[in-house]
Amino acid sequence: MEGHFYGQVFQDSDVYKWLEAVGNVLMLGRDEKLEAQADSVIDIIARAQQPDGYLDTYFIIEEPDKRWTNVLECHELYCAGHFIEGAVAYYLATGKEKVYETALRLADHIDSVFGPEEGKLHGYPGHQEIEMALLRLCDVSGDERYQKLAQYFIDARGTNRFFEEEFERRGSRCFWTGEKVEEPNRWFNQFPYNYYNQFHLPVRKQKKAVGHAVRGVYMYAAMADLAWRLKDRELFDAGKAVWNNIVERQLYITGGIGATHSGEAFTADYDLPNDTNYSETCASIGLIFFAQKMLQTEAEGVYGDVIEQALYNTVLGGMNYEGNRFFYVNPLAVVPKACADNTERNHVKPVRQKWFACACCPPNIARLIAGLWKYIYTVKANCVYVHLYMGNESSVKLGDCTLHLTQETNYPWDGKVALKVKADTPEPLEIALRIPRWSHEYTQG
Ligand SMILES: [Zn+2]
């Protein structure tokens, strides 16, 4: 209650991503020390929550009367989404309800502020993320309101003048510089903000990946997830068109996306410079989310191929072996001296950094790697699909029976994979194996 907020306006999200990583780790085995640390963080978060459920420490501390007045720039929905995802992971791992109830109160508050009804804000996030989180919360709580709200955020986007009107209401001022500007966001990127923030078209009409890459893939992942839940072909097809655009025309051989530092954004088809590209670690993580959500509807090998490509190159390359130094930007070619001397290249760091003023990537790697088990298998009807090859022991539910799967492998250093299967049923079951597209031959033992 004393002092000032410092750091990035979206900095709450870093600790929420850490909490999600903790939840993912604890799902593999409880750990008293780690839980005690997480519980003390949760106590602080719960105490910060306002009586009406609102939670965002920048606005609580600095501008309590300006809540929800700059949804475009200020990341309140983004931070809320990360908190909900962290809370759900921790609750599922430990059964501790405090964090889960805090998340429900926050989601209910957001539901009371946004939506199509008269008197609510007809808006959607400036930085997408909340859509994925609400769908996850719907799974765990069984409350369809959260899915409806996620659908509202997806379907309202690009159909009204919400961001334009909000910008006018706040006197056309840029949050970051405080100055009156012609258009938001232009001081750091060359794209009109409707492209940068992906509201240039209704979401269902978007066919090409544009704008800020991380925002884009978080939204496309939510579209694919929602399309699967609703069996909504139109929404799935929009996601698929964007997927094809990324994979066929805007994807680096390393699984990196976002060819320019200006707006950390997608650019033109086939524009893939090796040395000035951005390829943010978070963008490749979001691409993995997108691929996994597409797999729910369509068990195609390409999704596992892209997960593998992004994971083993950009994502793992984004961190050192010790786990304490990171790349934010992942180009394919670097001339160290030019990074300092050439403004076109000064976003590139030739060595991994200890931390960043904008520290989105390190905790994102943590939550992905801690939850990597979610990406190895999916199940459809009476078939289990193996997407990733990595050492693991897993139990997979297939209808009424349980399949125990063990993989032994030194992949990717060695292409040999031993998959052992134990089923508690005499009924025939199917196992589908992804044949990596780089593999010119394979044998089955
Ligand atoms: Zn990042």
Image (spheres, rainbow, N blue to C red):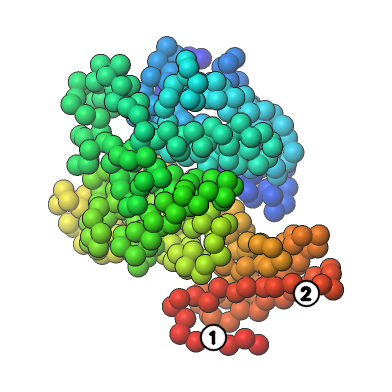
Rendered-image quadrant of the C terminus: bottom right
Residue name at image x 56 percent, y 65 percent: 299
Residue name at image x 24 percent, y 20 percent: 172
Q: Is residue 412 above or below residue 291?
A: below
Classify residue 66 by image quadrant: top left
Q: Amino acid at mark 2?
A: Pro
On the rendered structure, is 221 left or right of 170?
right
Which mark, residue 442? 1
Of residues 274 and 43, the one drawn nearer to the viewer in this rendering: 274
Classify residue 121 by image quadrant: top left
Q: Which class describes the residues within 10 Å of circle 2: few (<14), some (14-19), or many (20+)?
A: few
Which callout, 1 or 2, points to the residue nearer the camera? 2
Residue 275: give x, y in percent of width and height: 23, 61
Residue at which label 2 appears: 428
Q: Amino acid at mark 1?
A: Tyr
Residue name at image x 43 percent, y 24 percent: 122
